[in-house]
Image: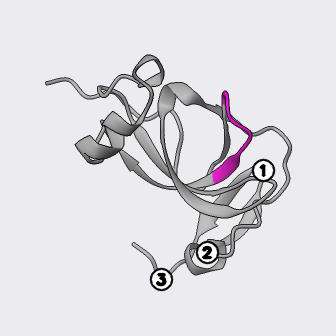
Amino acid sequence: MLLAQAKYTIGQVVRHRKHPFRGVIFDVDPEFSNTDEWWEALPEDARPRKDQPFYHLLAENDDSYYVAYVSEQNLVPDETGEPVDHPEIPNLFESISNGRYRLQSHLN
């Protein structure tokens, strides 16, 4: 099986193509790796392909902070240069530069 190469990287700030949230990538799955229940909870006409990278984000919108699981086809780079304010960022990342967060040095 051929796996797609991830377009985005850990620490990169991205936003959702359709929904009003943005976040920092903290993990990448080479293809869909969530539960069938999660998949089936999506409206059938909005389900992304499973054979693409999926990203774990420390996400934020105007109302809250949360962890999001998003397909590559639904992400675009965030061009604002603004930091993401998710409260878990200091646990994983050190600083932001040019729209990317740098992983803490003690993480592998």
SS at circle 3: loop
Q: Which residue sits at x=66%, y=28%?
A: 17
Distance between the Cα atoms at labels 1 and 2?
20 Å
Q: Earlier in the sequence, mark 2 or mark 3?
A: 2
Quarter of the picture holding the N terminus: top left
Task: Report the residue that reaches farthest toward the top.
Answer: 45
The magenta region covers 17-23
Q: Of circles 1 and 2, which is in front?
A: 2
Which amino acid lies under the numbered mark 1 shown in the image of this protein? Asn
Which amino acid lies under the numbered mark 3 shown in the image of this protein? His
Q: Position of residue 2 (x, y in %)?
A: 20, 23
Q: Position of residue 42 (x, y in %)?
A: 43, 33
**Label for residue 49?**
none
Sort mark 1 into few (<14), some (14-19) or many (20+) by Cα contacts within 10 Å. few
- Determine whether, in the image, residue 43 is placed left or right of residue 18: left
Q: Earlier in the sequence, mark 1 or mark 2?
A: 2
Q: Which residue is mark 3?
A: 106
